[in-house]
Image (spheres, rainbow, N blue to C red):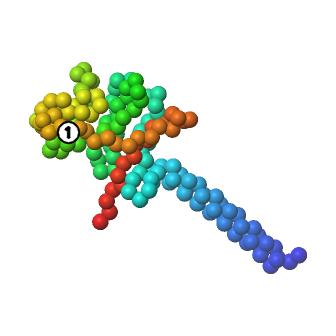
Amino acid sequence: MNDASMDRRTWLASAAMALGLLLSYGTLAVQGMMYLLPQQIGRRGRKLFAGRLVDYRVGGVRTFLDLEGNDILVKRDDNGLKAFSSVCPHLGCRVHWVDAEKHFFCPCHRGVFDETGIAISGPPADGGQRLSEVPLDVDKDGGVVYIEVKDIKRS
Ligand code: FES
């Protein structure tokens, strides 16, 4: 065996190793991005990770941001979980949960919503309004909660 064939073998072995490493790290990078990015649901929505079911206190509310920066309020009661948009149906102010009073409250015009999101006081009640529900999915096997939000609009 001469030096030229040895060099060619060494070069081919190095090229095969480099290609293998490139494919391995490329696959790892793609898998990592798929894990980190929200899962797309259809054309217009995404599933966002919203914690584990065991981390939700019965009677409590946890808050998450959707892709447009609005709060999503996820409430757990004896019947399970419900998610609501924090956008007040009256004039669009931000509603929040008042744990001591066990209701949702909008500070703009003192709108009050019960635990199921139905307006019980203030202008939203006069208009028969309620908080918009946000679809929610609980993976029973893993106990993982996902909220389904609208995709961001691209211009
Ligand atoms: S905007 Fe919420 S009560 Fe008016």
Q: Amino acid at mark 1?
A: Gln
| 146 shown above or below 153 | above
Residue 154 position in % (x across, y down) = 32, 63
The answer to whether residue 107 is visible is: no
Determine the residue positioned at 36% across, 55% down.
Answer: 151
Report the residue that reaches farthest toward the right.
Answer: 1
Position of 53 with respect to 82 (left or right) is right
* Crowd band around label 1 with a 10 angstrom C-alpha radius: few (<14), some (14–19), many (20+): some
Q: Which quarter of the rendering shows the N terminus?
A: bottom right
Judged from the image, the secondary structure of the residue bearing numbered disc 1 is loop
Residue 132 position in % (x across, y down) = 28, 42
CB at disc 1 and ligand 1 closer than 8 Å: no
| 8 shown above or below 135 | below
Nearest to the observer: residue 132 or residue 47: 132
Residue 15 position in % (x across, y down) = 70, 69
Residue 122 position in % (x across, y down) = 12, 32
| 69 shown above or below 27 | above
Q: Which quarter of the rendering shows the C terminus?
A: bottom left
Count of numbered tags: 1
Q: Which residue corresponds to mark 1? A: 129
Position of 66 with respect to 26 (left or right) is left
Determine the residue positioned at 35% across, 37% down.
Answer: 83
The answer to whether residue 9 is visible is: yes
The quadrant where residue 124 appears:
top left
Determine the residue positioned at 54% across, 57% down.
Answer: 30
Determine the residue positioned at 56% across, 53% down.
Answer: 31
Report the residue that reaches farthest toward the top.
Answer: 100
Position of 25 with respect to 11 (left or right) is left
Nearest to the observer: residue 86 or residue 133: 133
Position of 97 with respect to 4 (left or right) is left
